[in-house]
Image (cartoon, helix red, strand yellow):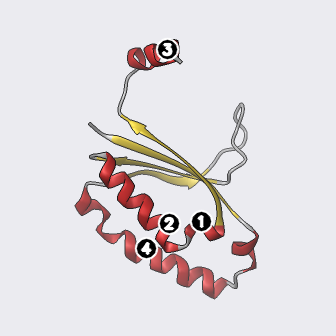
Amino acid sequence: MSHYLIELYTPNAKWNALPVEQRQHFLAGLQEAMGGLSSLGIEVLALTATEHDIDRASDHRFMGVWRFPDQQACEALLGGIKASGWYEYFDHVNASGTEGGFAQHLLELAQA
């Protein structure tokens, strides 16, 4: 069963204080580390700036949406993100869960 992760993040003051060269060095390291993700079955569905002109928009500036073959692959990515130092530079929240449909979700809501 597929597993999903949604990230919302915004650069913080520490990121904003980094010189451009240090930002580029950090991001180049991330790009290199992400190279092997597809071999784990990890799929990037979207990495993008968020839209703020929608109803109840998040204040976060960016989002990521990922699909995984299982929870272990999701945990591997989250571990890599944490180890990279990402959370030092971005105000970040994660949400994850398994594949599900509308009928199942309505049952979950009814039992909440």
Instruction: Give the residue at the far front of this rendering.
Output: 111
Location of the N terminus by quadrant is top left
- Mark 2–mark 1 distance (CA, rounded to whole Å): 6 Å
- Mark 4–mark 2 distance (CA, rounded to whole Å): 15 Å
* Residue 86 percent location from the top left of the image: 56, 68
Residue corresponding to mark 3: 111
- Mark 1–mark 4 distance (CA, rounded to whole Å): 16 Å
Tell whether label 1 touches label 3 (CB within 8 Å).
no
The crowd level at tag 3 (other Cα within 10 Å; few <14, some 14-19, many 20+) is: few
Instruction: Give the residue at the far left of this rendering.
Output: 39
Disc 1 marks a residue whose amino acid type is: Tyr
Disc 4 marks a residue whose amino acid type is: Gln
Residue corresponding to mark 1: 87
Tell whether label 1 touches label 2 (CB within 8 Å).
yes
- Of the residues under marks 4 and 2, which one precedes in the sequence? 4
Disc 3 marks a residue whose amino acid type is: Gln
Location of the C terminus by quadrant is top right
Give the residue drawn at x 44%, y 20%.
Answer: 105
Give the residue drawn at x 35%, y 42%.
Answer: 3
The residue tagged with tag 1: helix, strand or loop? Answer: helix
* Residue 97 percent location from the top left of the image: 42, 38
- Residue 43 can be seen, yes or no: no
Closer mark to the observer between disc 3 and disc 1: 3
27 lies above or below 45: below
- Of the residues under marks 1 and 4, which one precedes in the sequence? 4
Residue corresponding to mark 2: 82
Residue corresponding to mark 4: 31
Closer mark to the observer between disc 4 and disc 2: 2
Give the residue drawn at x 27%, y 46%.
Answer: 69
Please state which of residues 68 and 20 is positioned toward the viewer in this rendering. 68
